[in-house]
Amino acid sequence: MARGINKVILIGNLGKDPELRQLPSGVAVVNITLATSSSWRDKATGENKDHTEWHNVVFFNKLAEIVGKYLKKGAKVYVEGSLRTRKWQDKNGGDRYTTEIVASDMQMLDSRNSGGGSSGAADDYGSSGYGHSAGGSAAHTVRNESAAPASAADYNDGGAIEDDIPF
């Protein structure tokens, strides 16, 4: 039986400060919006064009704690994860859906002194994976052993994760 691939890799900037919260099960969770931008030259007008795409990203467990503690609005970050669509019912009983990236890996890309990301706070996280490149920037990679909570019922940010696969 063939297996599918569900993998997302993004490098972008946080749209706002992350807010760490706890699910009733005790699992830490952080939701962020991540901006990625592309630019091109319009062939018809010769004008430079830009487009910013906003991505919803959710972090769980230790990864959520690190994001909540060290990242700030504007921080440049590498995120790796998978797409997940959740379904819930709104106040009027209508079905609503949201698609988000469930992060399994994150790397802070800002330099320590840039003020956009770790702002030096990563020093007290220890030496596991935190290093300097020749360009003076700092990188800190964190993997989530369990990217999502144990069950869909544990994550109820507007609705449960849909487990039925339509094919």
Image: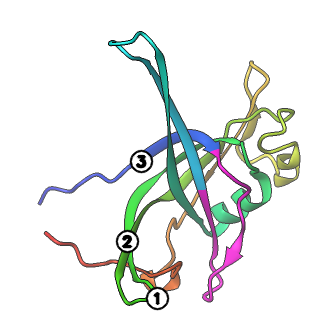
Q: Nearer the viewer, residue 33 or 42?
A: 42
The answer to which of 14 and 59 lies nearer the viewer is 14
Question: In the visual, does 37 lie left or right of 108?
Answer: left
The quarter of the displayed image where residue 119 is located: top right
Find out whether the residues at labels 1 and 2 contact each other: C-beta distance under 8 Å: no
The spot of residue 80 in percent (x, y) is 50, 48
Give the residue at mark 2.
97
Q: Gap in Å between the C-alphas at discs 3 and 2?
A: 19 Å
Q: Quadrant of the N terminus?
A: bottom left
**In the displayed structure, does residue 44 sit left or right of residue 32?**
left
The amino acid sitting under disc 3 is Val
Q: Work out whether mark 1 precedes mark 2 in sequence or the reverse, and give the earlier one.
A: 1
Left or right of 99? Residue 105 is right
Q: Position of residue 83 (x, y in %)?
A: 39, 58
Viewer-side residue, 2 vs 109: 109
Viewer-closest of 94 and 70: 94
Residue type (three-letter) at the residue carrying disc 1: Lys
Q: Which residue is mark 3?
A: 8
Looking at the image, residue 70 lies above or below residue 149: above
- Distance of label 3 from label 1 (alpha carbons): 31 Å
Q: CA distance from mark 1 to mark 2?
A: 14 Å
Q: Which residue is mark 1?
A: 91
**Is residue 16 highlighted in magenta?**
yes
Span highlighted in magenta in the image = 14-32
* Residue located at (84% from left, 38% from top): 115
Give the residue displayed 60% in from the left and 49% down from the top.
Answer: 106
Residue that appears at 28% across and 51% down: 5
Q: Position of residue 143 (x, y in %)?
A: 58, 54
Which mark is nearer the camera, 1 or 2? 1
